[in-house]
Image (spheres, helix red, strand yellow):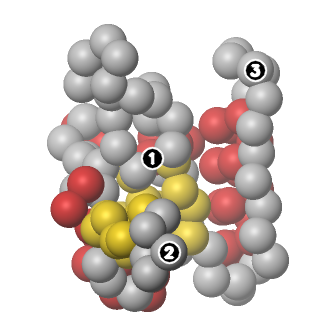
Amino acid sequence: MKIAISGKGGTGKTTIAGTLARLIARGGWPVIAIDADSNPNLALTLGVPADRAATLSGLPRTLLEERTNPDGTRTAGLRLPPSEIVREYGISTPDGVTMLLMGTVDHAGAG
């Protein structure tokens, strides 16, 4: 099952995503939660202590590689299989959710 949550700012997306992830994980299902927000707070919602959450860094851009296809078009792909990315960069949370942080905005125009 894949669930994506989107909407306008300030509508509770992070709260809903975190609560759903925790409840599903408590039910015994494996859960990977991906925080792709430019202002990431999902770790806090998933129960990661604030001091630990403040030190989390996003996935490195080096995980992506650009490829030129035989027809000359260019695409981006992952350098590692998704399962390896989760294993290497996933953050364990108290209820058993594995969280990935996509990245943060370092300066205006960077997102």
**Viewer can see residue 71:** yes
Q: CA distance from mark 2 to mark 3?
A: 38 Å
Query: Which amino acid lies under the numbered mark 1 shown in the image of this protein?
Result: Ala
In this view, the mark in front (3 or 1): 3
Residue hosting label 3: 8
Q: Secondary structure at mark 2?
A: loop
User: What residue sits 25% from the left and 54% below the top?
Assistant: 61
User: What residue sits 80% from the left and 77% below the top?
Assistant: 1
Residue hosting label 1: 43
Depicted 71 relative to depicted 13: above or below: below
In this view, the mark in front (1 or 2): 2
Q: Secondary structure at mark 3?
A: loop
98 on left or right of 16 = left
Quadrant of the rendering where the C terminus is positioned: top left
User: What residue sits 32% from the left and 12% below the top?
Assistant: 108
User: What residue sits 29% from the left and 78% below the top?
Assistant: 79
- Asked where in the image residue 104 lies, by quadrant, the reply is top left
**Which residue appears farthest toward the top when viewing the image?**
108
- Which numbered marker is on residue 71? 2
Is residue 15 or residue 86 the one in the foreground? 86
Depicted 60 relative to depicted 71: above or below: above
Q: Residue 93's x, y, as percent?
A: 44, 63
- N-terminal of the pair, mark 3 or mark 1, is 3
- Asked where in the image residue 70 lies, by quadrant, the reply is bottom left
- Are the two marked residues, 1 and 2, in contact with CB atoms closer than 8 angstroms? no
100 on left or right of 65 = right
